[in-house]
Image (cartoon, helix red, strand yellow):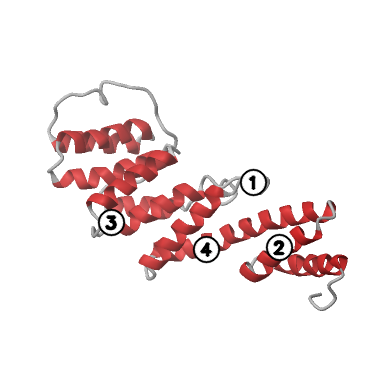
Amino acid sequence: MSAHPAPKAILAALATSALLITGGCASSGGGKTKETAYVARDVNTLYLVAKERLDRGQARQAAALFDEVERQHPYSPWARRAQLMGAFSYYVARDYTKTIASAQRFLTIHPGNKDAPYAYYLIALSYYEQISDVTRDQKVTEQARQALLDVERRYPETKYARDARLKLDLVNDHLAGKEMNIGRYYQRAGMWLAATVRFRNVVDNYQTTSHAAEALYRLVESYLSLGVQAEA
């Protein structure tokens, strides 16, 4: 969601403290190189090369190398770190589909790991970054909402939950905006009953958003147009 970029400081700080790397990441690097081709290497060397690529902003190469750590050394303690760092690298590269898949895989294998909150947070951010304009389908917005609620529910006292709550306010405002957009269309078309359904949804379920006051006003308008005085 370009209007509200993800907090890079939080991502970089966690990558530094929890995963022992620095997070100065910018644009992604693409292309298959000799570093990402299969060459048997010791785990330390492979991980450090991946970290170096990430530090240079070559996020796609870094992701491929972190994946290679797990593939070549699946039983090493570094493999667990590499799984999550691979997900983070895909996020930096803006490949949100692979971010979600990698983070979910990490959670499947290590559900109780101390870095699980961050994995859930990465999933939520990946949906959040894909939120589109209110004139388009809002399926991914609802997915972002559910993922953010999941972070808040599972880890309410963490910094991830605090950020999730802020983003939930924006997501709810976005979903309410979509309902208002449809409701206004129905009003212009004289489809008053359909309009009331949309405005009522905003009034009942999005009371804290910036659209609540207008929704109530338009709901009354629609009821009056239907001749329903009591509801108005």
Give residue 88's quadrant in the image.
top left
Question: Which element carries disc 1, helix, strand or loop?
Answer: loop
* Camera sees residue 58: no
Where 162 sits versus 31, above or below?
A: below
In x, y percent, where is residue 117? 33, 59
Which of the two marks, 2 or 1, is nearer to us in this view?
2
Residue 201: horizontal and vertical position, in percent? 66, 65
Q: Which amino acid does label 1 sit on?
A: Asp
Disc 2 crowd rating (10 Å Cα; few below 14, some 14-19, many 20+) is some
Q: State whether residue 84 is above or below residue 174.
A: above
Q: Name the residue under label 1.
A: 133
- Look at the numbered disc 2 and give the secondary structure of its residue: helix
User: Is 195 on the left-hand or right-hand side of 18?
Assistant: right
Work out whether mark 4 precedes mark 3 in sequence or the reverse, and give the earlier one. Answer: 3
Residue 151 image position (x, y, % from top left):
40, 61
As drawn, the label of residue 115 is 3
In-image side of 5 versus 78 (left or right): right
Q: Earlier in the sequence, mark 2 or mark 3?
A: 3
Q: What residue type is labelled 4?
A: Leu
224 or 115: nearer the eye?
224
* Residue under pointer 4: 166
Q: Mark 2 points at which residue?
A: 197
- Gap between marks 2 and 1, in whole Å? 22 Å
Task: Point out the tag, 4 or 1, that comes first from the N-terminus.
Answer: 1
N-terminal label among 2 and 1: 1
